[in-house]
Image (tube, helix red, strand yellow):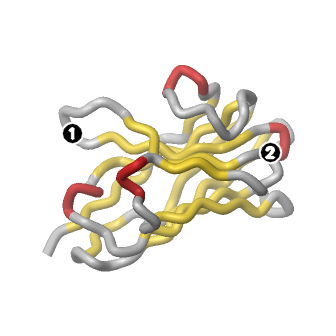
Amino acid sequence: QVQLVESGGGLVRPGGSLRLSCAASGQAFTRYSMGWFRQAPGKEREFVTSISASGLSTSDAGFVQGRFSVSRDNARNTLYLQMNNLKPEDTATYYCAASRLGVTATTVEEYEFWGQGTQVTVSS
């Protein structure tokens, strides 16, 4: 079991930035590749980005377009998502998740453990 707790969400104006964190506990964090997903009201949960267990490889959804950056600190068992140039359409609940299937895992079904989510609202 891996327990995941996200933090860092909030209200930000368009063009602003936020950094989300995901603290992991339980089984060895370094066994898992990690992903960020998001879910807007009335929409399905969608993949945002992922990072390999070592932190050396990442994969992004097309809409990221260089605005978001995923990283991890394995010594601190923490995953991060730096989000810049935020847009109103980025408004969603953001979830971190753990997978044993590698950085190419991009679907909900490929992730075993999930956090409870943190709300990001982009509005003027």
Q: Quadrant of residue 25?
A: top right
Kind of element beneath mark 2: helix
**Residue farthest to the top?**
109
| Three-letter code for the amino acid on which mark 2 is drawn | Phe
Residue 69 in the image: x percent, y percent? 55, 64
Mark 1 packing: few (<14 Cα in 10 Å), some, or many (20+)?
Answer: few
Is 23 on the left-hand or right-hand side of 38? right
Mark sitting on residue 29? 2
Q: Residue at x 23, y 74 (%)?
A: 14
Numbered badge on residue 30: none
**In which quadrant of the rendered image does the C terminus lie?**
bottom left
Q: Is residue 97 left or right of residue 85?
A: right
Amino acid type for the residue under numbered disc 1: Pro
Which residue has dot 1 on it? Answer: 41
Q: Look at 71% across and 60% down and name the residue there.
A: 72
Evaluate if marks 2 and 1 touch, with contact meaning CB atoms under 8 Å apart.
no
Q: Residues within 10 Å of mark 2 (few under 14, many from 20)?
A: many
Q: Secondary structure at mark 1?
A: loop
